[in-house]
Structure formats: structure tokens, C-alpha cells
Amino acid sequence: MDFFKQVQQPAKFEVEVVERRHAHKGLPLTEEHRRKLSETKKGGTGTFKGKTHTAEARRKMSEAKKGKKLPPRTEEYCRKISESLKGNQRSEETRRKIAETLKANALKYYGKSLIQWAEELNVDRSTINRHVKKGTFPEYFEKKTGKKL
């Protein structure tokens, strides 16, 4: 009878495992351990780096997003974002990169910039940009002004 009582007591082992799992919880880490943990976190690549989604996976993701709208940006939301960004100083290098990007984006379309065309035709810049990308800007200009480009 004592033999069966011993066999039916596996809880003792399980309790020990649970207690060991939390044995070091809350104890300070040594400098060496902290350094090793830090090194493992640095410069790691993402788990998906170098891979691409299949066409089927992209189609499924597209279908899942269709019909879903982002919540509207309320005044409070915009105010909070604005406040969080205030006081952030951009480095000279960052400012230079932004300037270069803006200059590159101010390409000349038929002798004028995107902004100049938008002002001249009294339309939004995105409209001009869309027609330029499609290659339909000359037709759009002719339709809007009655003149050939």
C-alpha cells in the first residue's frame, strides 16, 4: 500500500520546478551578465530580414485590410503628437538629409516645380503628382487650360 502512495505523488517534483523557475527573480545582475545581455540585443536583424512574403500572403494581407479605416485624427490626438515632438532638436546631419530630400522631390515637371503647377492650375499638388506619374499631365494641362503644353 505504501508503494502506491509514493507513485501517486508526482506533485513534489512539479512544485520544485516551479519554485526554481523564479529562483533569481528580483536579484541584481552582475556587470558581466548585464554586458552579455546588452550585446545580445545590439545590432540584431529582424526575424524577417532578407525574406519576402509570397503573392498569396500579400493578397491575404491586402484583403484583410480592405474596408478598414483608420480612426479620425481628433484635435486632442494631434495636440498630443505636437507636444511630444516639441523640443526635439534635429542634428545638422539630419537637417542636411531632409534638405537634400526636399530638393530632390522638387523636381521640375515641364520647366516648373510641382508647387508652381499646382498654384497655376489652382489644384492640389497630389493631383499634379498623380498625372505626372501616370504620364497624363500634358492631356490634363490641355483639358484644364485649353492650351498645348
Image (tube, grey):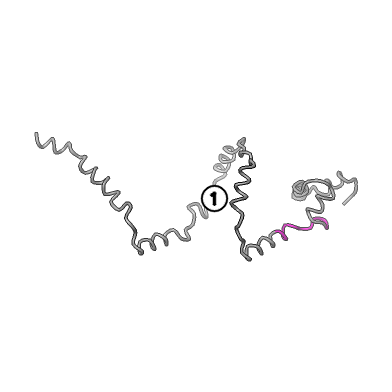
Q: Which residues are magenta?
A: 102-111
Q: Nearer the viewer, residue 23 or 49?
A: 23
Image point 15% across, 38% down: which residue? 7
Q: Horizontal and vertical percent for residue 85? A: 60, 53
Q: Outermost residue toward the top?
A: 1
Q: Which of the 4 image quadrants contains residue 36?
A: bottom left
Image point 62% across, 42% down: which residue? 76
- Please name the residue that numbered disc 1 is placed on: 52
Whether residue 137 sits left or right of residue 101 in the image: it is: right
Q: Outermost residue toward the right?
A: 147
Whether residue 66 sits left or right of residue 145 in the image: it is: left
Query: Against 11, is 128 above or below?
Result: below
Query: Against 68, is 94 above or below?
Result: below
Q: Outermost residue toward the left?
A: 1
Residue 110 is inside the magenta segment: yes
Q: Please, what is the three-letter code of the amino acid marked with disc 1? A: Thr
Whether residue 129 sits left or right of residue 90 in the image: it is: right
Q: Which of the 4 image quadrants contains residue 11?
A: top left
Q: Please identify the quadrant where the N terminus is shown.
A: top left
